[in-house]
Amino acid sequence: MRFSSVFFTDQPLTFCLHLNLSFFFLQRQKMSHPTETERCIESLIAVFQKYAGKDGNSCTLSKREFLSFMNTELAAFTKNQKDPGVLDRMMKKLDLNSDGQLDFQEFLNLIGGLAVACHESFLKSPHYQKRI
Ligand SMILES: [Ca+2]
């Protein structure tokens, strides 16, 4: 699987996203019914914080936290892996600044890559092919 580093790696974009998200969450607090997309974003943040808070820096995933996340949240993916080194290589590839930790942006590259792979798989599925 190829993981994209396109998502959220550009500094001005990061700044812009930070400002927009601050506004987003201020507005969000006033809303009683979040949209499905807003719930998805909140879920991603909550899951990241849950695993990042297990040891050390609570803003990043250590290798141990990453393995815990993968083996719990993406168990269907990890259980099907025959190569025992795949998670080590994924961690290295996702760790764009090579600090041994995955920050939220690096984590989102994983989620984005998996979402793209799932979407591509969906497009090839017989269910979808019948619709086109
Ligand atoms: Ca990193």
Image (tube, rainbow, N blue to C red):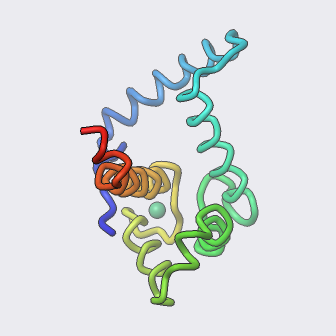
Is residue 15 shown above or below 6? Answer: above
- In the image, 115: left or right of 46? left
Q: Position of residue 32 (x, y in %)?
A: 72, 12
Residue drawn where x is 35% and y is 57% of the image: 121
**Among the 4 quarters of the image, the one containing residue 10:** top left
Is residue 51 shown above or below 87? Answer: above
Quick one: 20 or 44, which is closer to the camera?
44
- In the image, 2: left or right of 61? left
Q: Position of residue 16 (x, y in %)?
A: 38, 27
Quick one: 122 or 61, which is closer to the camera?
122
Q: Residue furthest right?
A: 54
**Among the 4 quarters of the image, the one containing residue 76:** bottom right
Q: Position of residue 20 (x, y in %)?
A: 46, 21
Is residue 75 shown above or below 89? Answer: above
Q: How many marks?
A: 0
Q: In what quadrant of the picture does the C terminus appear? A: top left
Q: In what quadrant of the picture does the N terminus appear? A: bottom left
Q: Residue furthest left?
A: 132
Residue drawn where x is 36% and y is 49% of the image: 119
Residue drawn where x is 31% and y is 33% of the image: 12
- In the image, 42: left or right of 93? right
Residue drawn where x is 46% and y is 50% of the image: 108
